[in-house]
Amino acid sequence: MAASVIETCHVACSANRAPNVVSWGRGGLIAFGSCNSVCLYDPQEGRVVGLLNGHTGRVNAVRWVHRTENAPECHLVSGGSDSRLILWEAQHGKFIQSVECKGHTAAVCAVDAVYTEDSKVLVASSASDSTVRLWLCSDDKDAECLHIVSFAGFMMAVSLALLPGTKVPVLACGGDDCKVHLYAQANGQLQKVMTLQGHEDWVRGVEWTSAGAELLLASCSQDSLIRVWRLCAKSGTDTHAEDDHTIIKMKEDVFEVKDRGLTSVFAASLETVLAGHENWVYGVHWHPPVYKGGELQQPLCLLSASMDKTMIIWAPEEASGVWVEQVRVGEVGGNTLGFYGCQMSPDGAMIVAHAFQGALHLWCKDHHNEGEWRPGVVVSGHFDVVQDLSWDPEGEFILTVGSDQTTRLFTPWKKQNNKEITWHEISRPQIHGYDMQCLAMVGRFQFVSGADEKVLRVFQAPRNFVENFATISGASKEKLLTTSDAASLPEGASTPALGLSNKAVFQGGLVPKNNKEEEQFNSISDQYQESYFHPLILTEPPPEDHLLQNTLWPEVQKLYGHGFEMFCLASDSTRTLVASACKASKAEHAAVLLWSTTTWRQLQRLQYHTLTVTQMAFSPDAQLLLAVSRDRTWSLWRRNPPTSESSEPRFSLQAHTGKDTAVHSRIIWSCDWSPDSKYFVTSSRDKKVIVWGPWRPESSGGSEIKPCSSVLDVGDSATAVAFCPVLCSDDSHLLAVGLDCGRILLFRWTPGQDVAAGGDWVRSGETDSSQSHTLAVKRLRWRPRAGRAGVGNNEVDGQTGIERKLKEESSWVQLASASADHSVKIFSLNKHHLQ
């Protein structure tokens, strides 16, 4: 497949809930595990630049293999819940799977790696099978397990380094026995040389750094303390100083190491204990070495991250040499837990932490104010299965819902000075107490969502969001506010402490109460302070703590009527109707409910299916409603002409398949309409994709609606399907099919072609291994119009330039996909490049 057919425009993802899952390379890329993938994120560009797909389980540990000369890395090692270690190697600007280490019998939880003198990669790994293993990966794609160390408990952190003045690797392991164990390699075997004691709870992180002729080891623990240990070589003359009792020195532990027939003696001592965190310290990270005066130097600077939601930079004072806190940054408020780990950029000007809910928190050094740090823009995404997504009617942003109980809004950010457009999450309209399942847009700034509850909830964008959306996307604020009835819009929303409903906050509600008013509570609930909304004036996408607290949308309606958890939603093109369906094992619960978006009353109950309706779609002309079900059939409902008695739309059953006429033999997962409303497509677990039709308004009864395409076998369960709203140049229809394995296939289908021989289907492209999802595709949605979101003509001069730009842009279409691998991806396709 030509590389230009599908371009990855955006990947929204988050870091896995594991302490060792983020690593910042000297080349500037942040590598982090997201579900089963390793994401390569460029904080300068503000986007994910690569995905490494190779693991079949969750990625728990990621480490760049740093080079001694501090050059950009060419190796990366990752470990996962599939018990495997993968060494990735850079080739021609891309990372490919180089070596796989198999041997662990349980999830790998920590990895580290260094280069040996002959440029082989030495990898240390710890796993839930209570072993630490040492591997040697050579150029011939071979991995040899050199040694296995078994423990009574679990080692949760490992770090490798080379002993000063030798080529002997030294390994530090920290675990649930509250000790730090040191091992040195001799004759290919690991030999225990020392145990460092002092921590009073589980050791969560260890990391070596080289400081001149010495090694420093930082260890952090659940006892809220960080210990820094110094390891140095002892010469023969040092031993006599032991007899001088007038000198006060820290207790030293001494061990010997043999290297090529020479015996070296090393001493380890406690350098300092750092107390400043108020909760478990999960991660420590040394400032990367930097070049000063042509020499590579190691700054004595340590970063730590804790469950108390703070990161601290520690460094010794110049005068006394005492280690003190230099900088403290963190998150305030919000119903969240703390940080799982931390990393520092190669120049030390940026620091990043990853949190319990997968969010990355980035801070940048303020170059104008010395010692000040400010939050930076960083990638974000769901931390559980993404169930559904929808474009807004204008195609300027997408809304997504997921099992992480959130609804998120992503839009392109137009920077003033940069023509490069990057997508970012700018609002989190709903943070719920139930897993989200489905959503449907019912206006430019209004949507309905359904979760694992029996209620549908309707949300309306607040004024603060519309203003910030205009600023970030480059749209006209006045135009947006006139279309969304600005006078009645609330300023924002907040959630009561024990509630699920977002309450609107109006302009008057932003004024703080005076003391007298505060003393007179109207009700008991008024005594408990809510997390009040504070309006944000955004010039760039907001950081995580703002997304959590200040970007909610007010809930304007609840819809009751279903007996079980919500499963799917659809809205028509006129935005006047919403169809909803819930989980069902009986016909009475499998009914589709129709709602009016003007009155929010239930209009009709459409009953045909006997099991859960899995997806619905209104035809683009809004005259037909298609429903597909777990009972392996589809049903087609037609809007009746308006009558004098009722102006409200009524639907009647027009066609359906039964047990005998159903072509699909398994659950039908997905359906969609062609842009001319003549054909519809269904996709099923039986690996078949079928186009049905044509629909003619004058026909009645279901006999005319039969398969009008050959049966397309896509080789895997087809979990999502979508018709592109824009026809190809040869008037063929473009279809995207999402598979259970995570791949997305593109087909062109031409009505009336050689159906018998299957000549009506032409395969036009597919996502490659780095673009594909790693788990099932849950939903595919094309942008409702041609062109790419955020790519305008404002930078083009002259009328002819605008016309040329518009013509060029009209050949592009965009496809958004949601997946069980926690990611949302947006792809751009040029129709002229289709095969």
Image: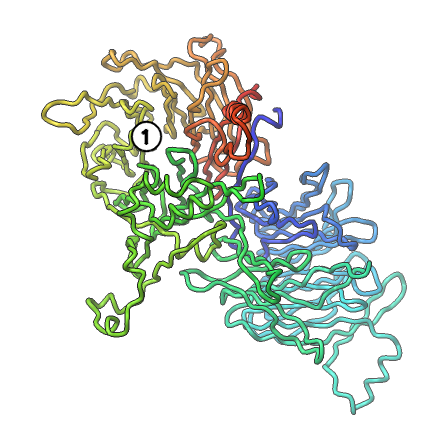
Residue position for label 1 = 616
Residue 350 percent coordinates (x, y): 61, 58
- Residue most extreme to the bottom: 246
Q: Residues within 10 Å of mark 1 (few under 14, many from 20)?
A: many
Label tally: 1
Regarding mark 1 in the picture, which secondary structure is present there?
Answer: strand
Q: Is residue 179 left or right of residue 637?
A: right
Q: Which residue is depicted at the point 54% across and 28% down?
A: 798
Front in this rendered view, residue 814 or 217 = 814
Residue 233 percent coordinates (x, y): 82, 71
Q: Indicate the amino acid at tag 1.
A: Met
In the displayed structure, would residue 5 be above or below residue 36? above
Q: Quadrant of the C terminus?
A: top right
Residue 555 percent coordinates (x, y): 28, 49
Q: Which residue is depicted at the point 31% across and 17% down?
A: 661
In the displayed structure, would residue 185 be above or below residue 33? below
